[in-house]
Image (cartoon, rainbow, N blue to C red):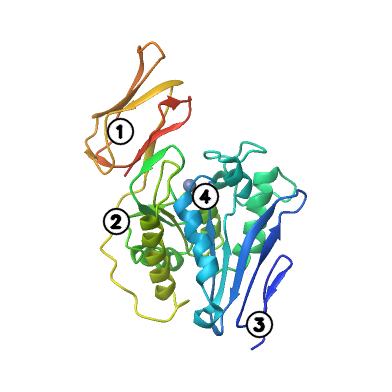
């Protein structure tokens, strides 16, 4: 079996690991990428960290996986991009990239002749999703997101593909598993191409800890065992609860944000969840839960701009 694993200008022969950069055509951006072509046959798995540049637990987890996964242990192929939104990572921006103020997770499948963010999306969807049998996008709660860990699985693929994504999401040891039909993000794009795809979130507020990374690594390794990329038994990392699709509130004023609910708090429809005041303390707007649910993230910045997310619930 002489199957080469080829992405961009990098080629990994069976039983080898190749590290380098994946060029984004038409600009000088290069994405750090690791290709592992396993000694044994199996699926092709694509993992990205840092779709949002300030989500450090996911990025550090991708960096560790790239360093530590060895071809002798891998069945099939693994491609890891670490981080995928390298301009946003070094610019330390929330949500968006520095060249075009676009959110990489809203621009898939991207454009070959688009802005930098659109071109990064196009590079990933055209060169990696086309080869993938499974896609995992490691997020980490953005710079101004206070977040409780959860995993989305996309429902945009076939029912078989969505079911596999859901079962895989459940072995990561993350408390909440949530279906998503969002179609402009990386994992939605992959799922629409019928690649089982999940997006996981651990961390937040521009921080990362060794504990979060270890939790993440245990979850990803368990997932890789579940889909057959790594040998060994799938471990019981804890039960996960399946929630209804996520909803969110966005700011209708620019001002100062004062949430009145916390993470994992159960809210009932009509309950006040926060308010926005101006710089003189005058209340500009009050916000109420549109339905019963559990709070999954709350924006932690005092400053808020019109249109910004305020919180999300299931
Ligand atoms: Zn994110």
Q: Are marks 4 and 1 in contact (CB under 8 Å)?
A: no
> Sequence-wise, which precedes: disc 2 or disc 4?
2
List the residue tagged with mark 2: 175
- Left or right of 148? Residue 24 is right
Mark 3–mark 1 Cα distance, whole angstroms, equals 53 Å
Mark 1–mark 2 Cα distance, whole angstroms, equals 23 Å
Relative image position of residue 277 (x, y in whole percent): 37, 17
Relative to the observer, which residue lies in front, 57 or 24? 57
Q: Residue at x 66, y 53 (%)?
A: 122
Mark 3–mark 4 Cα distance, whole angstroms, equals 32 Å
> Sequence-wise, which precedes: disc 2 or disc 3?
3
Residue 183 image label: 4
Mark 2–mark 3 Cα distance, whole angstroms, equals 38 Å
Callout 3: helix, strand or loop? Answer: loop
Is residue 136 visible in the rendered image? The answer is: no
List the residue tagged with mark 1: 290
Relative image position of residue 51 (x, y in whole percent): 54, 50
């Amino acid at each position: 079996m002489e199957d080469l694993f080829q992405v961009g200008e990098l080629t990994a022969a069976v039983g080898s690991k190749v590290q380098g950069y994946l060029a984004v055509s038409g600009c000088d951006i290069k994405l750090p990428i690791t290709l592992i072509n396993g000694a044994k046959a199996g699926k092709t798995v694509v993992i990205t960290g840092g779709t949002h540049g300030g989500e450090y637990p996911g990025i550090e987890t991708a960096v560790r996986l790239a360093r530590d996964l060895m071809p002798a242990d891998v069945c099939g192929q693994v491609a890891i991009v670490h981080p995928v939104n390298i301009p946003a990572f070094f610019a330390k921006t929330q949500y968006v990239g520095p060249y075009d103020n676009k959110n990489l997770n809203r621009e898939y499948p991207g454009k070959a002749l688009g802005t930098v963010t659109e071109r990064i999306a196009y590079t990933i969807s055209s060169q990696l999703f086309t080869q993938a049998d499974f896609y995992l996008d490691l997020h980490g709660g953005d710079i101004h997101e206070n977040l409780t860990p959860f995993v989305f699985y996309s429902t945009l693929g076939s029912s078989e593909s969505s079911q596999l994504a859901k079962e895989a999401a459940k072995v990561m040891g993350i408390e909440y598993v949530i279906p998503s039909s969002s179609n402009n993000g990386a994992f939605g794009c992959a799922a629409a191409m019928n690649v089982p795809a999940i997006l996981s979130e651990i961390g937040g507020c521009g921080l990362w800890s060794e504990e979060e990374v270890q939790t993440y690594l245990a979850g990803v390794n368990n997932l890789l065992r579940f889909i057959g990329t790594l040998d060994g038994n799938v471990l019981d990392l804890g039960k996960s609860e399946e929630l209804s699709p996520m909803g969110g509130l966005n700011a209708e004023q620019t001002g100062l944000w004062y949430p009145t609910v916390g993470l994992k708090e159960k809210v009932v429809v009509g309950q006040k969840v926060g308010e926005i005041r101006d710089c003189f303390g005058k209340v500009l707007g009050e916000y109420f839960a549109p339905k019963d649910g559990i709070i999954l993230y709350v924006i932690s910045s005092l400053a808020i701009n019109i249109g910004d997310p305020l919180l999300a619930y299931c």
